[in-house]
Image (tube, rainbow, N blue to C red):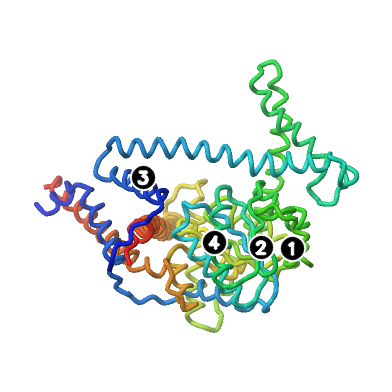
């Protein structure tokens, strides 16, 4: 195993900032606070610029300029789908969002908000109904005997787990007697699912640590 | 009893130090612990293998550098498997902040597989709009992404000939870290346009994807670094995910041990309080 440190200044900078962040594991210190504040500032600036170039320029300015320059025929029926002058309308609605800063005109901001909420409520409702509600209810109705002991047992556990977990969230009656037993069983099923979720979360966080160590060892120090 | 008190008072920095060492040592000296592939990963691999050679495949890479250790290996392996089948790969990004990373992955894998940009593979870049973009792609992909990442008119690219909407693709691969991602593709696209979907997600979001896998809304699933490593194993690759799995396994054993010891310490303390 030999060392081949990177010649790239940006890699050295990234490695130094990684070590600054790791130093917090020992205790809070000025190096950590410097890296943290730098990250917050750079992120805010980066996403501001990114939004400008990938949302405003790409989705509004460029299509509008192209549609109105007259080289693609009528502004409302240009060659490409995005070169349409009707983008003036969403642009206007976007500008109206800023009317919140003017107390006398702040009611105008309700119009674009109404459009945003209306569109997303519609998309989310139909999406949830199609993708989650109907399909999941359909998927929950399973034959308990499939001709195979293994899959049949799995289907039985699934059905019992589904029913007792649903009963756990039934609050119109005190959880006593049979309902108490069922809801307690439901709680155990929930705890198992929380445990699985926790295990996956640990895996995700350790993966991030592995990613950083791989960067330090291979990209920065060049260990081979 | 003194042991339990010692455990309860243990400085948590010791736990950080041991976790760090358990991750670092296997990265320096690999243990090559055994790794087998699970049914969701085999299903992911099989769904891609079942795509007719030479057909178009839509790959939505909705992640940013924060999810790089988990999703980059999946993206690279997926592109390699698709290009090996001579599939025409159309890559889109709906997650802000991911376009540059995804562009770099596409360029490197294309160069490695001698794929011609614009003919074998294309990167259409990022488009803001989340679910609205997903629905728009169902009407017209070229209208939703009129230009690629480099600003080229997509209608002039050979790979986009005949590509209209989701009906042009026998499979959609969704690699995602959060919103918008696989969940939104299932809700907005699978239910409405009935296109088969396979997904690769971060480990944090993997448990929420299993119901979709069970109902067949997802044909296959890669969950976190373990899923990526199992997939690499199926492709006979030894990538970054496989190399990280020894560290992952040791760290998990240590976390489980900490949970057991923590519970024992708490039990001992309660017993001591009772006495």
Q: Distance from label 4 to label 2 (Cα)?
A: 12 Å
Q: Distance from label 1 to label 2 (Cα)?
A: 9 Å
Residue under label 2, please give it.
B122
Rendered image: mark on residue B105: 4
Q: Distance from label 3 to label 2 (Cα)?
A: 34 Å
- Quarter of image, res A198: bottom left
Q: Residue at x 29, y 35 (%)?
A: A30
Q: Residue at x 69, y 59 (%)?
A: B189
Q: Residue at x 32, y 64 (%)?
A: A223
Residue A148 x/y as whole percent: 52, 83
Please say whether residue A178 is visible from this viewpoint: no
Disc 3 and disc 4 on one polypeptide chain: no
Rendered image: mark on residue B157: 1
Residue B202 x/y as whole percent: 48, 58
Of labels 4 and 2, earlier in sequence is 4
Rendered image: mark on residue A17: 3
Seen in the image, is A65 located left or right of residue A116? right
Of labels 1 and 2, earlier in sequence is 2
- Quarter of image, res B219: bottom right
Rendered image: mark on residue B231: none
Q: Distance from label 3 to label 1 (Cα)?
A: 41 Å
Disc 4 and disc 2 on one polypeptide chain: yes
Q: Secondary structure at mark 1?
A: loop
Disc 1 and disc 2 on one polypeptide chain: yes
Residue B254 x/y as whole percent: 27, 61
The answer to whether the residue labelled 1 contacts the one labelled 2, judged by CB atoms less than 8 Å apart, is: yes
Of labels 1 and 4, earlier in sequence is 4
Q: In the image as oriented, which residue stretches furthest toward the top?
A: A104
Q: Secondary structure at mark 4?
A: helix
């Amino acid at each position: 195993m030999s060392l081949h440190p990177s010649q790239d200044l940006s890699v050295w900078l990234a490695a130094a900032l990684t070590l600054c962040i790791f130093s917090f594991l020992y205790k809070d210190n000025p190096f950590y606070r410097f890296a943290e504040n730098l990250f917050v500032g750079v992120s805010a600036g980066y996403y501001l610029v990114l939004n400008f170039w990938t949302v405003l320029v790409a989705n509004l300015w460029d299509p509008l300029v192209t549609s109105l320059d007259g080289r693609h025929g009528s502004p409302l029926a240009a060659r490409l789908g995005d070169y349409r002058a009707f983008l003036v309308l969403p642009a206007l609605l976007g500008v109206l969002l800023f009317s919140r800063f003017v107390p006398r005109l702040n009611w105008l901001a309700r119009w674009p908000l109404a459009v945003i909420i209306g569109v997303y409520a519609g998309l989310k409702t139909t999406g949830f109904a199609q993708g989650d509600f109907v399909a999941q209810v359909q998927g929950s109705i399973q034959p308990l005997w499939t001709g195979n002991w293994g899959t049949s047992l799995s289907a039985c556990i699934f059905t019992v787990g589904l029913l007792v977990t649903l009963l756990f969230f039934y609050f119109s009656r005190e959880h006593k007697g049979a309902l108490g037993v069922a809801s307690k069983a439901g709680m155990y099923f929930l705890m198992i699912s929380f445990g699985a979720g926790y295990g996956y979360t640990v895996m995700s966080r350790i993966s991030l640590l592995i990613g950083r160590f791989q960067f330090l060892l291979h990209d920065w120090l060049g260990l081979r | 009893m003194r042991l339990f008190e010692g455990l309860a008072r243990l400085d948590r920095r010791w736990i950080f130090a041991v976790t760090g060492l358990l991750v670092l040592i296997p990265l320096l000296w690999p243990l090559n612990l055994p790794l087998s592939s699970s049914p969701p990963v085999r299903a992911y691999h099989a769904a891609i293998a079942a795509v007719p050679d030479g057909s178009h495949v839509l790959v939505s890479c909705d992640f940013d550098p924060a999810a790089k250790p988990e999703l980059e290996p999946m993206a690279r392996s997926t592109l390699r498997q698709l290009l090996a089948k001579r599939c025409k790969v159309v890559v889109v990004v709906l997650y802000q902040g991911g376009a540059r990373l995804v562009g770099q992955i596409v360029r490197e894998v294309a160069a490695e597989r001698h794929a011609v940009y614009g003919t074998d593979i294309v990167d259409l870049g990022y488009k803001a709009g989340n679910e609205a973009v997903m629905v728009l792609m169902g009407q017209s992909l070229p209208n939703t992404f009129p230009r690629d990442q480099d600003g080229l008119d997509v209608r002039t690219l050979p790979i986009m000939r005949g590509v209209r909407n989701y009906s042009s693709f026998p499979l959609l691969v969704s690699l995602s870290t959060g919103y918008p991602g696989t969940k939104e593709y299932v809700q907005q696209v699978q239910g409405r346009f009935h296109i088969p979907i396979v997904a690769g997600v971060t480990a944090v979001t993997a448990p929420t994807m299993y119901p979709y896998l069970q109902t067949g809304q997802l044909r296959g699933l890669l969950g976190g670094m373990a899923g990526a490593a199992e997939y690499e194993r199926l492709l006979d690759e030894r990538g970054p995910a496989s190399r990280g799995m020894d560290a992952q396994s040791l760290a998990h054993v240590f976390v489980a041990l900490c949970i057991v010891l923590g519970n024992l310490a708490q039990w001992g303390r309660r017993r001591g309080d009772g006495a």
